[in-house]
């Protein structure tokens, strides 16, 4: 169940929004000020904020900025009595996902919130597809980078392709010929020992103890296997 924070100082409007969101199946939290909203964001995992711009104390723009600093994935739908373009632009520049002007239709508000959350879920899944994690090791296909304990590991293009192939096929034992065909390509006519050389170099860069590898293991009489469970 998605958790929605309604930040609105006018109690009647806040109640109207909260009731409609509860009926729609969301878990709803409420805040009547910007300070209260930030405190709730610090203590809870909020999926989306329905955020009034004109608040006592810190305004909605500042709440949006601070909430995004707490959780960059949080979604924000801003509400305002103003229809000025600059307010809308400022909110969107701060990371707001959508914008509605008062007065508004509560059913449209719920519909927009659902659309925002669908987009956020889709984007999150796309990011996950681009990243594979095995314990302390993470490969980012989009940026073509490898990280170990959060520190980038410098790999050659071929080393990256070999490790990517291993991580896409955990616990599968490959012969050297299979690795040559899959990573170097069937048109490659070099020495088969190039696989051993690249495996050794990879171990030196990603293993805690290259002489006793835990990730890229030798399968005696066969080839190599990447051992690990994807997070």
Image (cartoon, rainbow, N blue to C red):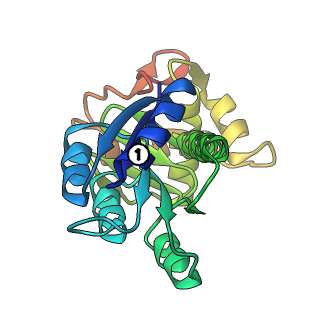
x, y percent for residue 129: 59, 40
Res 43 → quadrant: top left
Vertical relation: 79 (above or below) 13: below
x, y percent for residue 140: 50, 50
Numbered label tally = 1
Residue at the image point whose x is 57% and y is 53% from the top: 158
Vertical relation: 66 (above or below) 116: below
User: Label 1: which residue?
Assistant: 12
Neighbourhood count class around disc 1 (C-alpha, 10 Å): few under 14, some 14–19, many 20 upward: few
Res. 167 visible in picture: yes
x, y percent for residue 35: 19, 57
Residue at the image point whose x is 39% and y is 33% from the top: 28
Residue at the image point whose x is 20% and y is 68% from the top: 57
| Nearer-the-camera pick, 206 or 190 | 206
| Nearer-the-camera pick, 4 or 188 | 4
| Nearer-the-camera pick, 64 or 207 | 64
Res. 193 visible in picture: no
Q: In the image, 143: left or right of 30? A: right
Vertical relation: 56 (above or below) 111: below
Q: SS of the residue at dot 1?
A: helix
Q: In the image, 144: left or right of 180? A: left
Q: Quadrant of the C terminus?
A: top left
Q: Residue furthest right?
A: 187
x, y percent for residue 144: 53, 57
């Amino acid at each position: 169940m998605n958790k929605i924070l309604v930040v609105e100082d006018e109690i009647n409007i806040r109640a109207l929004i909260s009731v409609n969101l509860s009926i729609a199946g969301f878990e709803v939290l409420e805040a009547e000020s910007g300070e209260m909203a930030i405190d709730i964001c610090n203590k809870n995992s909020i999926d989306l904020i329905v955020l009034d711009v004109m608040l006592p104390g810190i305004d909605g723009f500042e709440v949006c900025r601070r909430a995004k600093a707490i959780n960059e994935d949080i979604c924000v739908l801003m509400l305002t009595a103003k229809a000025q373009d600059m307010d809308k632009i400022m909110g969107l520049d701060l990371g707001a996902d959508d914008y509605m002007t008062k007065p508004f239709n509560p059913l449209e508000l719920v519909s927009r919130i659902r659309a925002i959350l669908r987009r956020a879920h889709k984007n999150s899944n796309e990011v996950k597809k681009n990243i594979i994690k095995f314990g302390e090791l993470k490969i980012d296909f989009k940026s073509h980078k490898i990280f170990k304990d959060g520190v980038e590991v410098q790999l050659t293009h071929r080393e990256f392709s070999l490790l990517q192939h291993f991580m896409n096929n955990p616990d599968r034992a490959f012969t050297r010929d299979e690795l040559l065909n899959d990573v170097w390509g069937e048109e490659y006519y070099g020495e088969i020992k190039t696989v051993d050389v690249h495996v050794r170099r990879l171990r030196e860069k990603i293993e805690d103890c290259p002489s006793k590898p835990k990730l890229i293991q030798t399968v005696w009489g066969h080839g190599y296997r990447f051992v690990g469970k994807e997070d």
